[in-house]
Amino acid sequence: MDKLTIKTVFFASFLFLIGCSSSEVSEVDKVPDKSAQALFVDAREALDNGLFKKAIQILSAIDSRFPFGPISHQVQLDLIYAYYKSGDTDQGVALADRFLKLNPNNANVDYVYYMRALINLSTENNLFQDIVGIDRADRDPTAARSAFSDLKTLITEFPDSKYAADSRKRMIDIKSRLARYELSVARFYLKREAYASAANRGRYILEYYSPSNEMEDALEIMIESYDKMGLEDLKTNAMQVLAANFPENDIIN
């Protein structure tokens, strides 16, 4: 590459970076030059009217212009909510992470755990799959596990939180979702005659996701796997657990 070409590429890259920076700055510049309180009123109005992008713009301006003001924490909490409602999961999680790291003793820490869980759960949603009734239990459960962990932290450390009751309900649903994932993996191993791995996945469901609707299927996989491996004692134990919990199961009868 000759010197002229290098200079041209560098200049074009420089202009691109300036353009990006100018775009970011202009978004903040669009927010009127008001006091923090006046801007906060505008942001709350935008939130109340469902104008989440506008709210993010105003709240970000407050956070940038008045980072140590008396309402700085509330601004960040509202920003987390606005990111959640606007579907900007990356920014929402990043801000929640930052808030928890810098303000571990804040009175609203339970809310931040709750919102970070909701943000992670929102990545699990797929409108098209819901409409056509597709259960994608085999998809990556990382976000669901993170949400489960946050909700568990909330109810453990803040049992009296106003978000605790809803957190417990959501944990039941997440537990079932994670159990379905383990079940899909167990079936994958079973089809490929990896019986030890299939049985281990079934046992994992019993140990970590009980009670759940997936227990019966997990026990069936364990019984079949132990039978294929000739492990009669383990098969008998699994049969006993199945009979005690699901007496109407076809295998028992």
Image: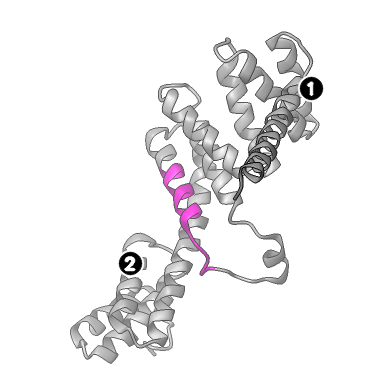
The majority secondary structure of the magenta stretch comes to: helix
Side of 105 where 36 appears, left or right: right
Please report the residue visible at 78 percent of the width from the left and 27 percent of the height from the top. 46
Give the number of callouts. 2
Between 217 and 108, which is closer to the camera in this rendering?
108
* Residue 161 visible in rendering: no
Give coordinates of residue 62: x percent, y percent: 66, 18
**Residue numbers of the magenta segment:** 137-152
The three-letter code of the residue at mark 1 reads Lys
Side of 158 where 24 appears, left or right: right
The three-letter code of the residue at mark 2 reads Tyr
Residue 30: mark: 1
Between 94 and 224, which is closer to the camera in this rendering?
94
Please report the residue visible at 33 percent of the width from the left and 67 percent of the height from the top. 204
Residue 88: mark: none
Task: Assess whether residue 144 is covered by the magenta stretch.
Answer: yes
Mark 1: which secondary structure? loop
Between 14 and 64, which is closer to the camera in this rendering?
14
Q: Residues within 10 Å of mark 2 (few under 14, many from 20)?
A: some
Task: Assess whether residue 208 is covered by the magenta stretch.
Answer: no
Q: Residues within 10 Å of mark 1 (few under 14, many from 20)?
A: few
Give coordinates of residue 237: x percent, y percent: 24, 79
Give the labeled residue for mark 2: 204
| 38 in relation to 7, above or below | above
